Every structure is written in C-alpha cells, then in structure tokens.
Amino acid sequence: MGPCFPRRSMQIAVQDVLDRDRVVLVPPLARTLVTPATGMVPRRLVVTARVGDDRVVLDFHARTAARIANPSETSLRPFSVHETLGPCRVEAVIGGRLLAFETGGIVEFAGGAHD
C-alpha cells in the first residue's frame, strides 16, 4: 500500500517568521563553534493535500524554537536543526469521514547554520 497523499498532491505554505529572540541556541557551548546568526524560522506552516475527494490540512503555529548547532564532519561550519513548538490543528476528510483535532505540535527544520 502506497502513501495516501503522494508528494505531488501536497502544497506547503509558510507565513511570517518567528522573532529571532524566541529562538534559543543550544547547547550553550555552541557559541564556541562561531555559529552565525540564526536563519529565519517560519512562524506558521500550512501543509495541504488532496487526492480525489480526500483532503487533509495541517496548520502549525510556532510559538518558540530551539536551534541545535552540531559540529560538521565535513566543514568548519556547524549544521543546524531548528525544533519548533506550538499549537497544531489537523482537519481531514478521508473516505467521506471527517477527522479534526487540535494538539501541541513539534516541527523540525534542518539546514546549514549559515542558512
């Protein structure tokens, strides 16, 4: 059985950015890596998908974030992962059945520390 929503049926939208003061650099020793300023972290992420009559919408609002700086094995520049926390709403119609819920969410953004 393949995925319910193939990648080509998905759309991703990003709105606004999280205030950089709300992004904490961890671990504390990361400052010794000469880590550049944090890149932009999306404040809102909306993922939608539709196949036939089936659809799903995930709406995530970042409230805070931690930037985890890791030393790179191939470069002097560290690699960053941003872990964001915030409320998330999911609404879907699958096989004619409605599913909707709200929960706390965690979304991870990965990339170079210079991004």
Image: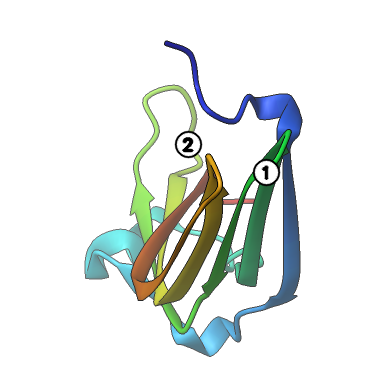
Which is more toward the observer, 3 or 33? Answer: 3
* Residue 11 drawn at (x, y percent): 75, 45
Residue 88 as seen in the image, left or right of residue 20 = left
Which is more toward the observer, 37 or 40? Answer: 40
What residue sits 53% from the left and 39% below the top?
95
What residue sits 46% from the left and 84% below the top?
63
Residue 92, image quadrant? bottom right
Please name the amino acid that badge 2 sits on: Leu
* Residue 38 drawn at (x, y percent): 57, 67
In the rendered view of the protein, which quadrant contains the N terminus? top left
Residues packed near mark 2 inside 10 Å, few (<14), some (14 to 19) or many (20 plus): few
Give the structural element (helix, strand or loop) at label 1.
strand
* Residue 100 drawn at (x, y percent): 45, 67
Judged from this view, the residue extending furthest toward the top is: 1
Q: Is residue 26 above or below residue 109?
A: below
Residue 46, image quadrant? bottom right
Pointer 1: what residue? 49
- The total of numbered circles placed on residues is 2
Which is more toward the observer, 56 or 88? Answer: 56
Residue 97 as seen in the image, left or right of residue 103 = right
For the question of whether residue 112 can be seen, the reply is: no
* Residue 8 drawn at (x, y percent): 75, 26
Give the structural element (helix, strand or loop) at label 2.
loop
Pointer 2: what residue? 76
Q: Is residue 44 above or below residue 99?
A: below
Question: Do tag 2 and tag 1 residues touch (Cβ < 8 Å)?
Answer: no
What residue sits 37% from the left and 53% below the top?
69
Residues packed near mark 1 inside 10 Å, few (<14), some (14 to 19) or many (20 plus): some
Q: Which mark is residue 33?
A: none
* Label 2 vs 1, first from the N-terminus: 1
- In the image, which is nearer the foreground, mark 2 or mark 1? 1
Please name the amino acid that badge 1 sits on: Ala
